[in-house]
Amino acid sequence: SGETVSERARIVLLAPAAVAGRVALAGGAPMAGAGVELRAREADGHGSRQRVVTGADGRYELRNTSAASGRLRARAPSH
């Protein structure tokens, strides 16, 4: 439908961890093949980036994240 839905949340990681979730369409159906990116910032100012693609169920997992803070973004798959 071309509709973009955006939600903002602050993510603060206290120790090496995994960030996992599910990307869904506005009606709740899973979004397979969506790109999920975590742009992280360490306490010392260094940055890193991790990318994954959601599975058929819309789920993703980013492992070994140790950032003090970060920005998580999901994008619909390219057609």
Image (cartoon, rainbow, N blue to C red):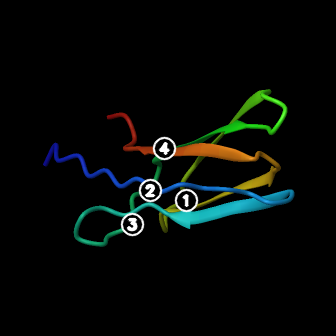
Which residue matches tag 4?
73
Q: Is residue 72 left or right of residue 3?
A: right
Return the residue found at the far left.
Answer: 1
Mark 2 burial class by Cα count in 10 Å: few <14, some 14-19, many 20+: many
Image location of residue 75, percent across then percent down: 41, 42
Disc 2 residue type (three-letter):
Ala
Q: Which residue is mark 3?
A: 30
The amino acid type of the residue labelled 1 equals Gly
Q: Nearer the viewer, mark 3 or mark 4?
A: 4
Q: Which residue is mark 2?
A: 32
Residue at left 37%, top 64%?
Answer: 24
**Labelled pair 3, 2 in contact (Cβ < 8 Å):** yes
Name the secondary structure under disc 3. Answer: loop
Label 2 near label 1: C-beta < 8 Å?
A: yes
Mark 3 vs mark 4: which is more N-terminal? 3
Element at label 1:
loop
Q: Earlier in the sequence, mark 3 or mark 1?
A: 3
Q: Quadrant of residue 41?
A: top right
